[in-house]
Image: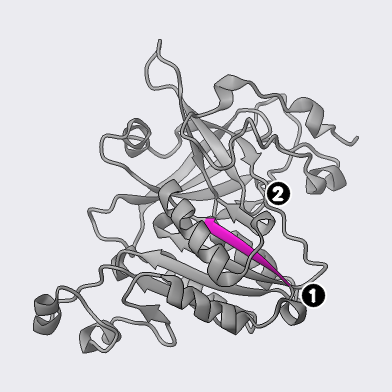
Amino acid sequence: MVCDEEHLFEIDQSDCCGNGCTNCILDNKPKPSVRALLAGKRNVILNYCKFKLLYKQTHSDSDKNSQVLHLHFAYEAGADEDDGILDIPPGHHVMLRATVEAHAPPLLRPYSPYWVDFERKQFKILVKLQPDGPMSAYIAGLQPQALLEFRGPIGNYAHNASSPKCIFIIAQGVAIAPTLPLITQVLDNEDDMSRIHHMVCARDLSHLYFRERLLEFAKYWNYRGCAYLAHQKCASAVCKENGGCNEECSAFRASLRYKETVRTRRLGANELETYCQLAGSSSSNGERVLIIAGHANFQEQMRAEAMKALGVLETNVYLL
């Protein structure tokens, strides 16, 4: 029997976290899952349901003080529930609801999965704990086997592989995580002729996450990636004197991986114009799409600059 997911999904004002999310749940009511409809099953996350924390671990490439965590969750089905699926499309987020105090309103925060297992109903998120943040304090105290409530998926991005596109993706810090499935869905489809230009902005190498994944992406003909480090420093005397590294620093170059492309400066208009030239004409390489993932201030600043430099229409700009 096919499940009418749109009928099952209900929202009200209390579902909004109040953080000014680009893709607010009040404005982006999830659409029925095509994959779920084809499977004849329901998408279990449409309404708040429990997910068990399988593990919580610090990101191996981050410094000890960054407090960046990987969290892996699995759906906790009730004894009387049917066998559903978990569909969280690339570019969408889920809402975590946590009750910290008995008589206080629950905390609500959106998180974007970077990995989802459709059939086993599992997902992973990357979280950076914020000093004095109530939800950060809650997550920091979680132990494996804890049950948390999530609902979703929330978002408005949908990739159409039927026609080639030139996709520019700009990510800041931990917000690189939700851009990974966006890239994967293109690279894993041999019939998709879209080209991806991936620009990752980070403080330094210790805050550049998923480096191995980026190197794997670089093996594909239609992916071009580069990391921009605004505050890279090393222990050399020259860099200490200059207050930072440059790309000719031997210590910095020794810390890079084979064929890893990194720039020791901010991503600015000059670099963006270079990507525009690399992309060629829209008639030959397809419609241009711009995706920006990061803090709200970063999104707004980068949006205006990137739209102008890359020649992207406003209707083709997506903020995660």
- Residue 169 visible in the picture: no
* Of the two numbered discs 1 and 2 in the rendering, the one whose residue sits closer to the viewer: 1
Q: Residue at x 47, y 61 (%)?
A: 171
- On residue 20, the disc is none
Contact, CB < 8 Å: mark 1 with mark 2? Answer: no
Amino acid on which the number 2 mark rests in the picture: Glu
Residue type, numbered disc 1:
Asp
The picture places residue 92, in percent across and down from the top left corner, at 62, 47
Q: Nearer the viewer, residue 228 or 58?
A: 228
Please give the label number shown on residue 191: 1
The answer to whether 15 is drawn above or below residue 304 in the figure is above
Instruction: Tell me if 26 is positioned left or right of 104 in this view.
Output: right
Question: Pointer 2: what residue?
Answer: 119
Q: Please say if 230 is above or below 220.
A: above
Please say if 163 is above or below 20.
below
Q: Residue at x 45, y 33 (%)?
A: 146
Q: Nearer the viewer, residue 63 or 304?
A: 304
